[in-house]
Amino acid sequence: MPSVDERSALEQFADPVLARRSGDGDVRAFATLVRRHERVVRVYARRILGSGADVDDVTQDTFLTAWQQLPGLQDTNGVRGWLLTIASRKAIDRVRARRDHDDIDDHEQAARTEDGPEHSVEAASRQRALGVALSTLPVEQRQCWVLKELGGYSYDDIATEIHQPVSTVRGLLSRARKNMIREMEAWR
């Protein structure tokens, strides 16, 4: 187990350095990346899935896939966006798998009570619909939307993360929001 000094020394490195070291097999560098980005991956997965158990699985699968793919990662500057892309794919796969197994009873008209099981089913259905809506967005729009709406990133931070000018980010977000409004119209 690395000492506190070793861990704090690794915390000082930027993501690209940690990603390159992780790609070379440095487990401690990868553990630092996991600590640094686990929260945003969890939040993102929870927004798509809504389920705690699935969130844990998607988070774990995301970092397992990242560990396997890091040796071939060419652009180490956008690690967070890359991780969110992996998480997006994993979460959407879970949503699709659920949808394939949905029972027709899950889609009955929910009662208006806020604390009954009907409310829970409605909330879960809304979360699934959000996941499906996100899956219809082009990758760059989805990344921008997730970073802004779920991650709380500024336009400048998003531009840095996806390597695009701020004007492009604004356009991508505008289109993403219009698409999300259209896709989620039934839930208004």
Image (tube, rainbow, N blue to C red):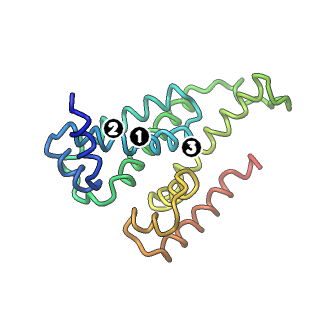
Helix, strand or loop at disc 2? helix
**Measured from the top left, where is residue 125 in percent x and y?**
67, 35
Residue sitting at x 72%, y 23%:
105
Residue sitting at x 43%, y 75%:
165
58 horizontally vs 65: left or right: right
- Which of these two is toward me, 164 or 18? 18
Q: Do the residues labelled 2 and 3 touch (CB within 8 Å)?
A: no
Residue picked out by circle 2: 63
Q: Are marks 2 and 1 in contact (CB under 8 Å)?
A: yes
Mark 2 / mark 1, whichever is N-terminal: 1
Q: In this view, does 109 lie above or below 139?
A: above
Label 2 and label 1: CA atoms lie apart by 9 Å
Picture quarter containing residue 89? Answer: top left
Residue picked out by circle 1: 38
63 horizontally vs 173: left or right: left
Mark 1 / mark 3, whichever is N-terminal: 1
Label 2 and label 3: CA atoms lie apart by 20 Å
Helix, strand or loop at disc 1? helix
Residue picked out by circle 3: 131
Residue sitting at x 71%, y 28%:
121
Q: Check disc 1 and give the amino acid type.
A: Glu
Q: Check disc 2 and give the amino acid type.
A: Phe
Which is in the foreground here, disc 1 or disc 3?
Answer: 1
Which is in the foreground here, disc 2 or disc 3?
Answer: 2
Label 1 and label 3: CA atoms lie apart by 19 Å
Helix, strand or loop at disc 3? helix
